[in-house]
Amino acid sequence: MARKKLIAGNWKMNGLTADGTALAKGIAAEVKALGKPQCEFLVCPPFTLLAAVKKALRGARVALGAQDCHFDAKGAHTGDVSPLMLTDLGCAYVILGHSERRADHGESNELVCKKAEAAHQAGLKTVICIGETLEQRDAGQTIDVCSKQILGSVPETATAADTVIAYEPVWAIGTGKTPTAQDVEDVHAAVRKVLAKKLGRANANKMRILYGGSVKPSNAKEFLSLPDVDGALIGGASLKVEDFMAIAKNSGC
């Protein structure tokens, strides 16, 4: 089944107003130059840059996303941002359950699921992240870990229209190390089977599963040409216009 690839940039905790705006303008110009791109584009800057990046992306076919949200619409949650606040700013997507959130903030599958449900209710699409650590990989637990994260983190009501899965092996994020193409395809195919069990085959066949973890122009074509890989969630390489766009172009956008 044909699924339109999603090329997503996770800027993480990077960028002040001047360089974040310049990066967004550069991406917007490149995407405009593509005319009608074969892929969808998404950038997820830190909260502080959302308004500036939205303005910089004006007129370009690039969606705006955030990197996290709370599960409540409002309330006494100092330092948190609600899904409704994100839609109010013009966000279309939010990343949830990234391994750095799971590790640094102790986020559980249950919490990720609760956030995803709230995000969907607010009209946001979610990019729900899964992935194993090096110890889990070496112990042969990759499929089991990813399956449990899918079953626990993805709402029962999720659909291909409001949910994207991102497989990011924790040991590959920012390290320059990557699994083999066969390893990636095996995990993505297994994840799609788990999604089919949880959400039904029709939903699973339509749902996009991205790969992330040291994605760069030199390996994008190999990974993004795999049958069950429907785009990329890009970290460090999304902070350079030329690298981000090269990954897109190398993947057929």
Image (cartoon, helix red, strand yellow):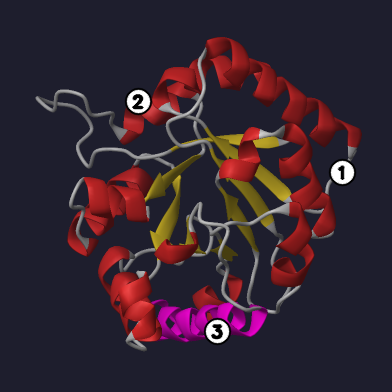
Q: For the residue marked with disc 1, what is the amino acid?
A: Lys
* Residue at the spot 46% in from the left edge and 22% down from the top edge: 89
Most prominent secondary structure in the magenta stretch?
helix
Q: For the residue marked with disc 2, what is the amino acid?
A: Met
Q: CA distance from mark 2 to mark 1?
A: 30 Å
Q: Is residue 68 magenta?
A: no
Q: Mark 3 touching mark 2, by CB under 8 A?
A: no
**Picture quadrant where residue 48 is located:** top left
Q: Earlier in the sequence, mark 1 or mark 3?
A: 1
Which residue corresponds to mark 3?
Answer: 189
How crowded pointer 3 is (Cα within 10 Å; few <14, some 14-19, many 20+) is rated as some
Q: For the residue marked with disc 3, what is the amino acid?
A: Ala
* Residue at the spot 22% in from the left edge and 42% down from the top edge: 71
Of all residues, the one furthest to the top in this rendering is: 18
Circle 2 SS class? helix
Q: Which residues are magenta?
A: 181-201
Q: Position of residue 56 (x, y in %)?
A: 66, 17
Q: CA distance from mark 1 to mark 3?
A: 29 Å
Q: Is residue 117 above or below residue 12?
A: below
* Residue at the spot 36% in from the left edge and 39% down from the top edge: 122
Q: Earlier in the sequence, mark 2 or mark 1?
A: 1
Mark sitting on residue 36: 1
Which residue corresponds to mark 2?
Answer: 85
